Amino acid sequence: MDMAFLGDLLTSVADRGRALIGFERFAGRNRPIDRLCEDLLSGRGEASGMALAQAVLNAWEGLDREGRQAFFMMLQERFGPDQERLGKAIEAYRKEPSTAAIAALHFASEPRRQELLRRLNLAPDGTHVLVRMREALFEAMEAEPELKAVDSDFRHLFGSWFNRGFLVLRRIDWRSPANVLEKIIRYEAVHEIQGWDDLRRRLEPADRRCFAFFHPQLVDEPLIFVEVALTGAIPHSIGELLSGEREVLSAQAATTAVFYSISNCQEGLRGISFGNFLIKQVAEDLKRELPGLDTFVTLSPVPGFARWLDGIIADPGDFHLSNEERSELARPASETGLLDDPAKARRDKLLGQMAAQYLLRARTASGRVIDPVARFHLGNGARLERINVGGNLSARGLREAHGVMVNYRYELGDIETNHEAFATRNTVVASSGVRKLLRPAAN
């Protein structure tokens, strides 16, 4: 069904609902948002329910920062589980823990705000507004951590509404609608796009691809997108992929697909995972389109490396780091360009060793791999293939990772095994080349 037609249809139904309930009187200025929410939950008909949902969302969008904070606190305090119903369900379960009693207890324990959010989603453009609402909730949680319970309800519902079965994969190219292209420029979070000419260099050549997931309720709003370079070998640096002077390769001659930038577009969907599905489906689609592709890798940032390394320099702990090595690692990035070739080679070797230590052995207090990008790709079943010192010499790359980038390799036949090793044992599957970089721990 055409999405514009569907939107018009929903708006028409909502308009009919307004007429049925006397909307101007019912949702006038003196009708507080909490009463509108209670009315929405009271079980009116579907058309009037859509109109009421629209009234609540309109009222919410008119709130200032303090008003939105109060709205979220209202959801927390007044729209939790129905205590009377829950108490009866608990008592019934204690008397007879039957399947029916368990089901009744399950439904009684659900916060009322979950059903409220479901009904708000009935409004035209309701999904979009609810995504923005969760963005505001993140800010509210900074002042009121107890609002995490409200966020849990958003996350639970979004996990259902945005599951893989509802997502549509679309290729983005230079002929895509301008409003979509503008959002690709705006949302690029890894390697900033320097205007329309730069975007064209990433989309138009035969050896470039871009794919995004869309949701039927968020027309022309990408949820996440990935930029892909088709190459003849695994790249060492982002510069060789983004250079405006590179030689364009024909798609049929490519042997390697490089996922070099993955960007989430909707802050309100933080924590709802799309990237694992995206990479795997794009890899499968590219393989069908270009059978000559036999290597699928990323060229990924290592955003936590510099911060971790600063801690090691301050306190080496179990590392064999001489004072000279600590001084070298602490050298400002602005000075590294002045090093002669032997000194640069020594520094690069040392950085590679420390990056291997960071990715293979460094853990959080809870035992997780520290680097968030590593967790993402290793959790998806990739292998840590290669560490590239000097892979990103931009200001951001030097600031976050001393210029280090990483290749994660997706062997389609090994993804499930690698994922299982990481998920169950926190094992980092890595190539022998990466493992050889590890320095021995101190005794």
Image (cartoon, helix red, strand yellow):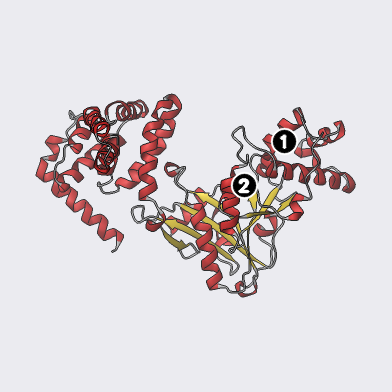
Residue under pointer 2:
374
Q: Circle 1: is it few (<14), some (14-19), or many (20+) Cα within 10 Å?
A: many
Q: Is residue 256 left or right of residue 73?
A: right
Q: Position of residue 269 (x, y in %)?
A: 43, 44
Q: Secondary structure at mark 1?
A: helix
Q: Nearer the viewer, residue 428 or 274?
A: 428
Q: Amino acid at mark 2?
A: Ala
Mark 1 vs mark 2, CA separation in Å: 16 Å
Q: Position of residue 34 (x, y in %)?
A: 23, 29
The N terminus - image quarter: bottom left
Q: Position of residue 126 (x, y in %)?
A: 29, 46
Q: Position of residue 363 (x, y in %)?
A: 65, 37
Residue at figure coordinates x 21%, y 28% from the top left:
84
Q: Secondary structure at mark 2?
A: helix
Residue at figure coordinates x 50%, y 64% from the top left:
174
Q: Quadrant of residue 346?
A: top right
Q: Quadrant of residue 148?
A: top left
Above/below status of 289 relative to 433? below
Q: Nearer the viewer, residue 292 or 362?
A: 362
> Is residue 328 among what the camera can see?
yes
Residue under pointer 1:
309
